[in-house]
Image (spheres, rainbow, N blue to C red):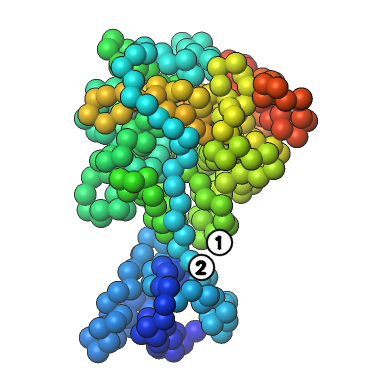
Amino acid sequence: MDVSVFLHLVLQEISSGGQGLRPYLIGFNDRSLYERCRKALKDLRYSHSALASIEERPIISSLRCYFPKKLEQRWYPFKQALTVEEDTRMVINTAFRTTSTGERGIPWGVRHIKAPLAWSTTTGHRVRIGVIDTGADYHHPDLRHSLLSGINFVQPGRPPQDDNGHGTHIAGTIAAANQMYGIIGVAPRALIHPVKSFDENGSAYVSDIVQGIEWCVRNKLHLINMSFGMKTRSKSLLHAVTQATNAGIAVVASSGNDAKRKTIDYPARYSQTISVGATDNSRRIAPFSNRGSYVDIYAPGDKIVSAWLHGNYHEMSGTSMATSHVSGAIALLLALKPELKPTEIKALLRRTANPIYPLRGRASSTKESAAGEIDIARLLQECK
């Protein structure tokens, strides 16, 4: 590929002055080609100030630019060397939340999936989990022994401190460990690396998610929790998820909160992930949860109390909360069986799940309830 021709095309698009500029992610299939392009871009910026707006994404060998809408067909000559797609925004998967000053100790969801029965055998010791979210509150007393270093893609160079609360809530369900005064998560001795790809409003670009996944792969984590989703496919996101699973990292993703019966959000819809729907305390699918044949496993996601900012606690509902229960369960499993591959973990979860009840007032549907609710006691028994 002629790097000079490529960059002049980029300059032409940036300078076109068209309406409706949108962020695009240009991914290079060859790392050496990306480095050549970076070098040439550095030289061209001296004579073309418009190129200063291009953001480099070295972790994922990509450039991020603002172009007019409907761009892809113009890149046909470079299709063998590049992937070009809009850098879509996505949001964290929460149905609703309320302030909570009540439940402490072991939250109902942790008890419901029988995590306490496993703690004499496994607590998730030293299993390292990447939580791609809004960061985490490093000062929360329930998480002081659970959080390791992470990375911040929203404010590069700064710690991944949570300014939203969602990431802290997810981390608490997975690995909170404050037996005397706070709550206990599913895997209280698991270790969490917060990956801050979402801003204070709970919003992120695909490029920041992809960078987060790549960071987890590079740091050889065991598991990735992704409690977020979007409605459209992304080649870059699929490539990153595939790379993670090929590296032996289980990727757990939330199905979404639209009460849909035949589809779920991406990235949960990708077959490489472990997709999670939400149940309530009656072992029924929560009314807000997406459901159907794309869901691999269900877990508690209704009225879940967990850690929040500034040492507080909130009650939240959503498939995000269900996903964190499943990530904690996988951490318990991996502490005992670290050699398990993502496909084996998914098969175990499905095989050992409990049947779920249909929604109240609705007849049972085979497709809707094909997957069951996680049962940690059965899961670990299967591995003996």
Look at the numbered disc 1 and give the secondary structure of its residue. helix
At x 53%, y 80%, the residue is 75
- In the picture provided, is 367 more to the left or to the right than 205? right
Q: Say above or below: 308 vs 69.
A: above
At x 39%, y 49%, the residue is 203
At x 61%, y 37%, the residue is 259
Please give the label number shown on residue 296. none
- Tell me the crowding category of disc 1: few under 14, some 14 to 19, or many 20 or more residues within 10 angstroms, Cα based: few
- Marks counted in the figure total 2
Q: Which part of the image, by quadrant, shows the C terminus?
A: top right
Residue type of the residue flagged with mark 1: Lys
What is the x, y in percent for residue 383? 62, 22
Q: Say above or below: 379 vs 147.
A: above
What is the x, y in percent for residue 303? 46, 23
Residue type of the residue flagged with mark 2: Glu
- In the picture provided, is 64 more to the left or to the right than 285? left
Quarter of the figure with residue 21: bottom left
What is the x, y in percent for residue 278? 56, 29
Q: Which residue is mark 1?
A: 235
Residue 341 visible: no
Q: Which residue is mark 2?
A: 85
Residue 347 visible: yes
C-alpha distance separating marks 1 and 2: 8 Å
The residue lying toward the viewer, choosing from 21 and 86, is 21
At x 51%, y 77%, the residue is 71
Determine the residue located farthest toward the front in the rendered image: 361
Quarter of the figure with residue 192: top left
- Tell me the crowding category of disc 2: few under 14, some 14 to 19, or many 20 or more residues within 10 angstroms, Cα based: some
The residue lying toward the viewer, choosing from 349 and 163, is 163
Look at the numbered disc 2 and give the secondary structure of its residue. strand
Quarter of the figure with residue 105: top left
Could you tell me if the residues under marks 1 and 2 are in contact, i.e. CB atoms within 8 Å? yes
